């Protein structure tokens, strides 16, 4: 038997992908990775303007008919199912589904990034709807095309706060917060990963990527505390996630499913 080369295993030419949260910071790293390796990508995001702009920029760099935009509010089940269906029809099938959209610590909704005693059920429900429930809905909608593709790969984006509790000392003296629903939803994604990995096997692989904190011009005090607590002595950049996406989306990880690939600079290794 002749083994394929690494470059052949990493190749995504002809494969079709949907990326939720594709207009965001991490979304850009995901989009670029898939496009660089040859895939065609539908960028799905709630922000219509950012989605169109990101699609235009990527089309200019990687060629027309390689990136498409789709606007959708993942809190709406009916709209989510319709958007996934429309994207699959536009692509002519589906090989890769990546869920990167989320309510994060900087999301501006009442009762969210506030002290625990002030966090509301409304904010909790809204976050779980987008962060966790929408992943369940999307996979249901995409299940058969992914099975039919012969290359089905699902990647769900979790967080270090899905595997470890927050160190609230990092946030002292800043306006930043760490909502309970964020960690709960990200932990839920890891269990959903394991469930789907066994349920959709052997036709579709399902894995998670768990990033650490990403540098986004946070307050200096937070950044310094975070770096001091991290073995790699810095926060992540979006580029740090490209290798993980390339690995799990492609045949480089053909025998990997149900796995959580932690990209945190050693944060959870202490």
Image (spheres, grey):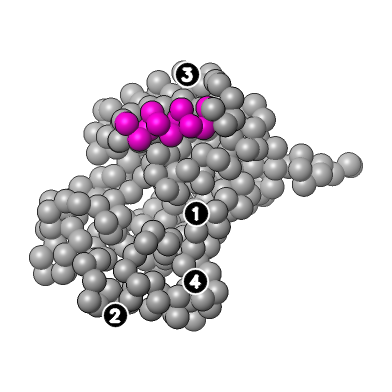
Q: Position of residue 94 (x, y in %)?
A: 53, 28
Residue that numbered label 2 is attached to: 169
The mark nearer the N terminus, 1 or 3, is 3
Q: Alpha carbon of mark 1 to alpha carbon of mark 4: how far?
A: 13 Å
Q: Looking at the picture, tell me which residue is in the foreground, 179 or 240.
A: 240
From this view, report whether residue 169 is shown above or below residue 247.
below
- Quadrant into which the N terminus falls: top right
User: Is disc 2 placed on a helix, strand or loop?
Assistant: helix
Instruction: Verify whether residue 56 appears in magenta.
Output: yes
Give the CA separation, mark 1 to mark 2: 25 Å
Residue holding disc 3: 90
Which residue bears the numbered disc 1? 238
Of the numbered discs 3 and 4, the one sitting upstream in the chain is 3
Q: Earlier in the sequence, mark 1 or mark 2?
A: 2
Disc 4 element = loop
Say which residue appears at 16% left-offset and 51% top-offset.
109
Query: Pointer 4: what residue?
Result: 234
- What x and y, as percent, mark residue 171? 27, 74
Identify the residue at image location x=51%, y=46%. 29
Reply yes or no: does residue 50 show up in magenta. Answer: yes
Q: Nearer the viewer, mark 2 or mark 3?
A: 2
Q: How many other residues sit within 10 Å of disc 2, few (<14), some (14-19) or many (≥20)?
A: few
Label 1 element class = helix
What stretch of residues is rendered in magenta? 49-59
Which label lies toward us, 2 or 4?
A: 4
CB atoms of marks 3 and 4 within 8 Å:
no
How far is mark 2 from mark 3, CA to CA? 47 Å
- How crowded pointer 4 is (Cα within 10 Å; few <14, some 14-19, many 20+) is rated as some
Q: Return the disc, 2 or 3, that comes first in the chain's sequence.
A: 3
Looking at the image, residue 178 sits to the left or right of residue 109; the answer is right
Q: Position of residue 87 (x, y in %)?
A: 43, 24
The secondary structure making up most of the magenta span is helix
């Amino acid at each position: 038997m002749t083994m394929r080369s690494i470059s052949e295993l990493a190749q995504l030419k002809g494969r079709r992908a949907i990326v939720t949260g594709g207009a965001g910071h991490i979304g850009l790293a995901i989009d670029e990775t898939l496009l660089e390796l040859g895939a065609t990508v539908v960028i799905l995001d709630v922000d219509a303007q950012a989605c169109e702009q990101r699609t235009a920029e990527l089309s200019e760099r990687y060629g027309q008919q390689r990136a498409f935009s789709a606007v959708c509010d993942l809190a709406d089940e009916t709209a989510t199912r319709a958007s996934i269906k429309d994207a699959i029809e536009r692509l002519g099938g589906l090989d890769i589904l990546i869920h990167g959209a989320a309510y994060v610590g900087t999301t501006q909704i009442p009762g969210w990034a506030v002290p625990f005693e002030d966090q509301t059920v409304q904010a909790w429900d809204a976050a779980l709807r987008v962060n966790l429930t929408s992943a369940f809905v999307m996979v249901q909608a995409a299940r058969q095309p992914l099975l039919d593709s012969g290359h089905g790969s699902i990647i769900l984006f979790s967080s270090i706060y899905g595997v470890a509790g927050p160190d609230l000392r990092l946030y002292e003296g800043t306006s930043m917060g760490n909502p309970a629903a964020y960690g709960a939803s990200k932990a839920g994604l890891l269990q959903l990963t394991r469930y789907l990995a066994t349920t959709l096997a052997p036709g579709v692989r399902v894995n998670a990527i768990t990033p650490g904190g990403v540098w986004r011009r946070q307050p200096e005090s937070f950044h310094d505390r975070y770096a001091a607590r991290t073995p790699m002595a810095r926060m992540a950049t979006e580029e740090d996630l490209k290798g993980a996406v390339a690995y799990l989306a492609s045949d480089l990880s053909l025998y990997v499913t149900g796995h959580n690939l932690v990209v945190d600079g050693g944060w959870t290794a202490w």
